[in-house]
Amino acid sequence: MVEGATRRLSEFAAGLRLDDVPADVVSRIKTLILDQLGAEVLASGLPWVSGIRSYATRYSRSGEALLVGTGESLDAEYASLVNATAGHGFEIDDYHPAPTHIGCVAVPSAMAVGQEQRSSGRDVLEATVVAFEMIARVADATMPSMIFDRGFHATGAHGVFGSAAAAACLMGLSPQESLMALALAGSHASGTVEYTQTGGDVKRFHAGVGAAGGIRSARAAAVGMTGPPTVLEGKKGILLAFSAAPDVDALTEGLGDKWSLMATAIKPYTACGLLNPQIDAYRAVMARNGLQTSDVERVVVGGDRFAVVHVGTIGPEPTSIVGAQFSTHYSLAMAAVLGANDFQTYQRMEREGFCDPAVLEMAHRIELVLDSECDARYPDISKATISIRTRDGRTFDGEAYSYRELPREEVETKFRKLVSETLTDEQADGVVDSIARLEDLPDVAGLARLLVRRG
């Protein structure tokens, strides 16, 4: 084991300054912040977010952190709980190939504490870089074994460390207090993926749990609470407890020079990250060969062992949006029959009880199988293959990878679409402009106010 890995991470986080961060990393983080804020706005009014908001407004003290969409001012822990739940609230947030989800914890945590501390945009940008890199490295050190072998959900279990690090930075904690913030965060790392077998809203909640837990950990460290300084790499630490195949070197190798966060991808489709390459592959084969949906007899999707378990269990007849978004059969049938896997289409399917006859009929003609080539790449889970058999006996094959880059212009277009029913065009313009010059903002509160519905 690498000695002092947790300490080295905490020292990196406490000492990072924006001038030390390469320009391409800063640019990437700004794009990821924009994407995440769009996800938060989109989901801010959904039932599972509304329920958590009711809980938070009932039990929170008054505070300086605004709830995205509705604008209540709450304590930072509670505001991050709500906003992070929204940020992970509809499977449209970013994902890292480890795999894990980062922005839905990192951004709400940094924004909430930044408002509480009246931090500048530059300070919040630094803290967000710290949070993204912390989460990405913990993910690289534990995944995919953590989820495949042990059944833990990455979002909260990884995210809490990024949240704690960001909060410690913005609160100005000492190096020892920052280390203790990470040490205490280990006791908040939690959440399982049983929802992939049954569905359930809890999947969204895990981001909120991670964000709030990280802030709580930093606050506890600030008043003297202590924990194990080897919480990640120790003999009874997170890596060995949560993963059957941990890679402790991933925590610190190239720290400050190699940026693990740069692998974070932005989703084109509103579905589990594993489904994104499956949808891409299907669309590409259909377009390349001039096929119509009516031509398709059967679709065989190939994936690795993780894909088979994670998105192959729900089957062709989901009963909830979470189930639909974690079903190869149903989501790919939506792509085939409806030509869309966006927010509005999943919402419509829910209103119809996931009983659209054409979608269900196609879903039952889709099969997800273990592909030996994909599985040989494991734990790289980025590839999907597809084989389409037509009614006249022809077969067309293709493949795609999860982590294709979306151009900045496409991300901005996506953001504007996500917020269109909640924010005015002027507000959307203001958010885009504020993030572009985030390091120059004297106070991040102005950006937060732009995320509240008007009228």
Image (cartoon, grey):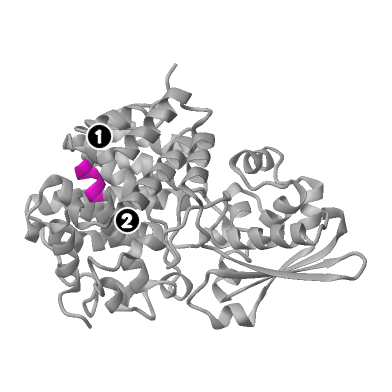
Q: Secondary structure at mark 1?
A: loop
Q: Are marks 1 and 2 in contact (CB under 8 Å)?
A: no
Q: Position of residue 455 (x, y in %)?
A: 44, 16
The quarter of the image holding the N terminus is bottom left
32 w.r.t. 352: above or below? below
Mark 1: amino acid = Val
Q: Nearer the viewer, residue 440 or 368?
A: 440
Residue lying furthest right: 392
Q: Position of residue 220 (x, y in %)?
A: 14, 51
Q: Which residues are magenta?
A: 122-127
Residue on which the image places disc 1: 444
Q: Is residue 55 left or right of residue 1?
A: right
Residue located at (39% from left, 49% from top): 32
Does the rendering let one see residue 95?
A: yes
Mark 1, mark 2: which one is toward the viewer? 2
Residue on which the image places disc 2: 25
Residue located at (16% from left, 37% from top): 117
Q: Position of residue 38 (x, y in %)?
A: 45, 39
Residue located at (81% from left, 65% from top): 298
